[in-house]
Amino acid sequence: MRPEEEFVKNSVINYLGGCIEAAAGEDPPDYYFTIDGVRVAVEVTQLVEASYDEHGRPKNRRTEDGFSANLCDQLNTQLGRYLPEGLALLLVIFGPIKVPRRFKKNLHQQVGKLVHDTGVTPGWERTYDIDGNKVRVHVVPQHSQSQKRITGLIENCDTTPFIKQNASVILASRINAKQAIMSKLSWSGPKWLCLLNDFWLADHETYAMALAEMTISHEFEKIFLVSLEGKIHVLYEKE
């Protein structure tokens, strides 16, 4: 199981207390909980801030931002060791990336020039246009040997500042997607959905209000919201 799935499982078990047995499922479901002799199919997913296309439809922001994050890791591995001692680079990449392959090549070339530039010192910064995407580069001190020499911050320009709208879109998307998956199981017992909240701007009250205003059909008897600190709130419980 992925680390986030294990984290959610353990958090929910701690919240419920008592004697609960947990076993890995067939994916789906992610887990089976056995509580007082009743076996429950449990599915886990994450709530991540959405980005939107030109028609206002939600996209997979994790995939979009993941490209830039992975690229920063690659630059650190390939070029970080060439930076002068005591210096590190912080790249602020404004996505989503329009032409990924060309952007990767040209950003690599630009960073390659910077790591050999003896004129850059802590506090130096510059903004570049790399194939239609803005990249802001900051030179910062390297505080420890374990610190990455090249790190990145990802800014997605296709997001919206409206927190409740984001929460509603994310929640509906995840519930619908997991309902479609779980409905195909030959399972007549109870089903639970556990949502790991990776969109820190929205708290349990925001999601509860969003869910209360939705008209959405699902078979989950309980829906849990799990914070990144392991705190649990029940968003939905079948009456």
Image (cartoon, rainbow, N blue to C red):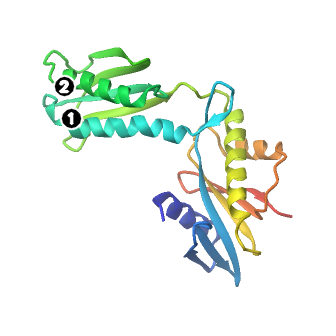
Q: Which mark is residue 108?
A: none
Residue at image coords 71%, 35%: 164
The amino acid at mark 2 is Val
* Contact? badges 2 and 1 (CB < 8 Å): yes
Residue at image coords 56%, 61%: 8
Count of picture labels: 2
Q: Estimate how packed mark 2 is, as few (under 14), some (14 to 19) or many (20 or more) residues with alpha carbons within 10 Å.
A: many
Quarter of the figure that contains the C terminus: bottom right
Residue 102 on image: x %, y %: 36, 26
Residue at image coords 26%, 37%: 76
Q: Judge by depth and name the residue closer to the eye, 20 or 47.
A: 47
The amino acid at mark 1 is Gly
Which quarter of the picture shows residue 80? top left
Which quarter of the picture shows residue 39? bottom right
Is residue 106 shown above or below 167?
A: above
Q: Is residue 136 left or right of residue 219?
A: left
Residue 177 on image: x %, y %: 68, 52
Residue 107 on image: x %, y %: 31, 25
Residue at image coords 63%, 75%: 33
Is residue 135 shown above or below 181?
A: above
Q: Judge by depth and name the residue closer to the eye, 84 or 61.
A: 61
Q: Estimate how packed mark 1 is, as few (under 14), some (14 to 19) or many (20 or more) residues with alpha carbons within 10 Å.
A: many
For label 2, the SS is helix
| First along the sequence among labels 2 and 1 | 1
Identify the residue under disc 1.
80
Q: CA distance from mark 2 to mark 1?
A: 7 Å
Identify the residue under disc 2.
115
Q: Judge by depth and name the residue closer to the eye, 80 or 21.
A: 80
Q: Judge by depth and name the residue closer to the eye, 181 or 123.
A: 181
Residue 28 on image: x %, y %: 61, 66
Q: Is residue 102 left or right of residue 234?
A: left
For label 1, the SS is helix
